[in-house]
Image (tube, rainbow, N blue to C red):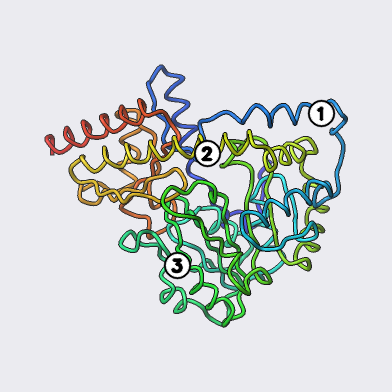
Amino acid sequence: MTFQFAERMSRLGTESAFEVLAHARRLEAEGRSIIHLEIGEPDFATPQNIIDAAVRALNDGATHYTPASGIPQVREATAQYVTKHTGVPTTMENIVLTPGSKNILLFALLMLVEEGDEVIVPDPGYPIYRSLVEFIGAKAVSLPVRQENAFRIDPAELRSLVTDRTRLLIVNSPGNPTGGVLTREDCEQIAEIAQQRDLVVLSDEIYNRLVYDGAHTSLYSIDGMAERTIYLDGLSKAWAMCGWRLGIGAMPVELAKRMDTLMINSSSCAAAFTQWAAVEAFDSPESDAAVDTMVHEFHRRRDILVDALKRIPGIECHQPEGAFYVFPDITATGWEDRDLANALLDEVGVAVLRGSSFGPHGAGHIRLSYANSVENLMLATDRIATFLGAAVSQS
């Protein structure tokens, strides 16, 4: 049978990290040595106390449906966590829990954006932003995030991109793929634009606990922004819980009610035992200590990796302030980013992502995740340096 797919499927993109990971796994199955710097997942185990809390919940019967937006006690604990880390008084009614944070993004687009509307997305940025905007029939407008500005949004450039068709602004700090972190002044200027132009903002702050230099400023916390912001967070990054699938949205009550309806019509609810595990993540000293340990190790790896990359001729590497990625400029090597990423994996077994997969303004860069051991990071940079040296000598 020949299937005729809906036209919207042609507008749906992908997440290149999973494509590269699949290719890397095939090479490993052939006996190749592969260093994985492609996937955006902490290489730490979920803290044991959180696992124990989930097991207790399962043994206590947390195997059934829950209310669509989440178990009331868990939503209350989540609201308290958001209040603590943003300073914004947040209640249970503001909280929606979903199976993975991508659902918060998708539901925000479905309930606020019509076909033909414009959504401003960071570029380079998480590729699912653009993919889902275009999937629903809206126009993704690139907001350049430039290395010369420490991979931060330029408020003046943002202001120039807002039109009468702009319905949503997506902001990500700390940023994927760049590790850029917005300053308080940046956030205040973005907030001023959003309020002047009556924009709703989706503030993706899932890396907010992974900041190395200075403190994280939540756009949600700026005066006047809680009433127009969808704050996006989750368990995946801070507590190494990618596979547990729990996304967190904090938003005005009117939006939370609509998102609840979308949950009823799609996933029904997030897993009950995962929700109870979140309470343990939010409330226990053991969980906080585990986050601190992970952040300290990521900080150490960042410094080592950036220093090693800077020593490779042709590579310019800005030091990121958050997340666990570096996004070096490789234009001086003479390679296109796609070609270099492919060659590094196929020729020397280093899996990285091409910068252009994160948007047109990512061209000329590659993304490396330092969610790997220092030993492997050093081996990877040695392989990259050797490959580029050999490639230059052969040209």
| Element on which disc 1 rests | helix
Residue under pointer 3: 143
State the residue at coordinates (79%, 63%): 258
Look at the numbered discs 1 and 2 and tell me whether their residues touch, using CB distance below 8 Å.
no
Please tell me in which quadrant of the rendered image residue 228 appears. bottom right
State the residue at coordinates (52%, 38%): 292
For residue 19, say whether it is visible: yes
For residue 116, say whether it is visible: no
- Of mark 3 and mark 1, the one earlier in the sequence is 1
How far apart marks 3 and 1 lie (CA) works out to 44 Å
Image quarter in which the C terminus is found: top left
How far apart marks 3 and 2 lie (CA) works out to 32 Å
For this rendering, which residue is in front, 304 or 247?
304
Give the x, y percent position of residue 384.
Answer: 26, 34
Give the x, y percent position of residue 291.
Answer: 56, 38
| Element on which disc 3 rests | strand
Residue under pointer 1: 58
Is 381 drawn above or below residue 144 in the view shown? above
For this rendering, which residue is in front, 48 or 34?
48
Question: Which of the two discs, 1 and 2, sits closer to the camera?
Answer: 2
The mark found on residue 292 in the picture is 2
| Element on which disc 2 rests | helix
Please tell me in which quadrant of the rendered image residue 308 appears. top left
Give the x, y percent position of residue 41.
Answer: 52, 37
Question: Which of the two discs, 3 and 2, sits closer to the camera?
Answer: 2
